[in-house]
Image: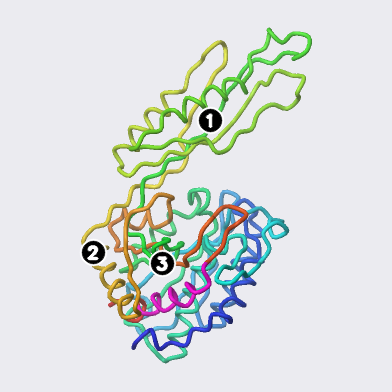
């Protein structure tokens, strides 16, 4: 089977994807994510998949696991792992509506990663229409919490991956049409400053500001960044009344490194910031972590298979390790052959200018179909 012969219809794919993109699904809104998972589950059920719903926990929505009909159903096969949560709050469509401009199509979560998830289902649909039976059974797992580090579903992803031979992750492709064969390690941290309250007008000097200490520590954390390990604070909350010296301030920080040893040293440096200065206590606790994923020979063999299919389609397919974690960190770190970045090309993820390159829907759809039809 030559994937170039599959009749992918870009306009039809855009029409289907629009419904997904316009179903806003920010991570922390479990009901909104569940509505998106319902859409995907229905689409896969129409395709003939057996749908299982896995209950959520920790305040997150659940998961959808779909197994497509196959004569070897139940044997190790291919796991396609994608997330349906986005960083965009409900209401973002008013600022970032679905819009096409030439080869660009805009919308919240369209690139990260609803576009990649959708083209994966279209690839399966095209193979089924062509009566192509994949050598291995296919399982799709859609999850609700990747954008916050996958705290509630890591165990499900890892368990499902270990029941399969390969893992394909349709996260956004690289700008050079590349795929991802490794991911940097990532750690998250919770920050808390506790001061002493006073009336900011009448007795300012009697208080000890938690906001002031948080600001001081943010500068210190940013200054810790090196080429080997980066640090940034992305969330800050503090105070309740402007006429009160703030008693508490909280925040969240992120650290990323190409090597696990560098991240481990970074974690030690962050935790060492805990202490008390001028009657203000600063506390750092470790949050969720993504392990470094370094490609092994089996992942590179999987990449070589994908590169051969791309060449058959007349496309180059470079590869490399990437920052910005994904659930591929977990499966790759387990030693399961994993290929990431198989989704759409696009740019400006997590912003109000997020878009995809329209022509990548069919291109990457054919690449995915070729992989599914040839992996054995």
The location of residue 236, given as percent across then percent down, is 60, 34
Q: Position of residue 68 (x, y in %)?
A: 45, 79
66 or 92: nearer the viewer: 92
Q: Is residue 320 left or right of residue 123?
A: left
Q: State the quadrant of the C terminus.
A: bottom left
Q: Which residues are magenta?
A: 357-370
* Residue at the (57%, 24%) spot, across then down: 215
Residue found 72% across the figure and 56% down from its top: 91
Quadrant in which residue 46 is drawn: bottom right
Residue 234 falls within the magenta-colored stretch: no
Identify the residue at the far left of this view: 297
Sequence-first tag of 3 and 1: 1
Tell me the tag on residue 191. Answer: 1
Which disc number belongs to residue 298? 2
Question: Which of the marked residues, 1 or 2, is nearer the chain's N terminus?
Answer: 1
Residue 134 x %, y %: 36, 83
Q: Secondary structure at mark 2?
A: helix
The Cα atoms of the two marked residues, 3 and 2, are separated by 17 Å
> Could you tell me which residue is drawn at 42 percent across and 56 percent down?
327
SS assignment for the magenta stretch, majority:
helix
Classify 52 as above or below 340: below
Q: CA distance from mark 1 to mark 2?
A: 39 Å
Q: Which residue is mark 3?
A: 342
Q: Earlier in the sequence, mark 3 or mark 2?
A: 2
């Amino acid at each position: 089977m030559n994937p170039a012969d599959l009749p992918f219809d870009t306009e039809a794919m855009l029409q289907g994807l629009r419904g997904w993109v316009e179903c806003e699904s920010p991570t922390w809104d479990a009901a909104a994510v569940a509505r998106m998972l319902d859409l995907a589950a229905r689409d896969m059920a129409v395709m003939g998949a057996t749908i299982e719903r896995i209950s959520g926990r920790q305040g997150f929505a659940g998961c959808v696991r779909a197994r497509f009909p196959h004569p070897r159903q139940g044997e190790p096969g291919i796991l396609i792992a994608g997330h349906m949560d986005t960083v965009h709050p409900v209401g973002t469509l008013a600022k970032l509506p679905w819009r096409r401009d030439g080869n660009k199509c805009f919308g919240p979560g369209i690139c990260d990663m609803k576009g990649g998830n959708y083209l994966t289902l279209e690839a399966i649909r095209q193979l089924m229409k062509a009566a192509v039976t994949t050598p291995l059974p296919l399982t799709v797992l859609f999850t609700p919490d990747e954008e916050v580090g996958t705290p509630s579903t890591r165990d499900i992803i890892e368990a499902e991956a270990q029941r399969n031979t390969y893992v394909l992750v349709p996260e956004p492709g690289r700008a050079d049409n590349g795929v991802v064969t490794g991911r940097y390690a990532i750690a998250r941290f919770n920050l808390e400053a506790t001061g002493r309250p006073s009336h900011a007008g009448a007795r300012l000097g009697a208080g000890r500001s938690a906001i002031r200490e948080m600001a001081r520590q943010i500068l210190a954390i940013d200054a810790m960044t090196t080429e080997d390990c980066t640090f940034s604070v992305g969330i800050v909350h503090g105070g309740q009344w402007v006429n009160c010296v703030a008693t508490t301030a909280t925040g969240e920080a992120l650290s990323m490194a190409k090597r696990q040893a560098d991240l481990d040293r970074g974690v030690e440096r962050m935790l060492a910031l805990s202490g008390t200065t001028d009657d203000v206590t600063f506390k750092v606790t470790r949050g969720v972590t993504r392990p470094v994923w370094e490609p092994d020979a089996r992942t590179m063999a999987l990449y070589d298979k994908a590169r051969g299919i791309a060449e058959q389609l007349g496309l180059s397919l470079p590869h490399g390790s990437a920052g910005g974690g994904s659930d591929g960190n977990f499966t790759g770190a387990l030693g399961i052959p994993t290929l990431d970045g198989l989704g759409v090309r696009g740019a400006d993820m997590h912003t109000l200018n997020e878009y995809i390159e329209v022509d990548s829907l069919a291109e990457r759809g054919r690449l995915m179909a070729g992989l599914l039809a040839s992996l054995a």
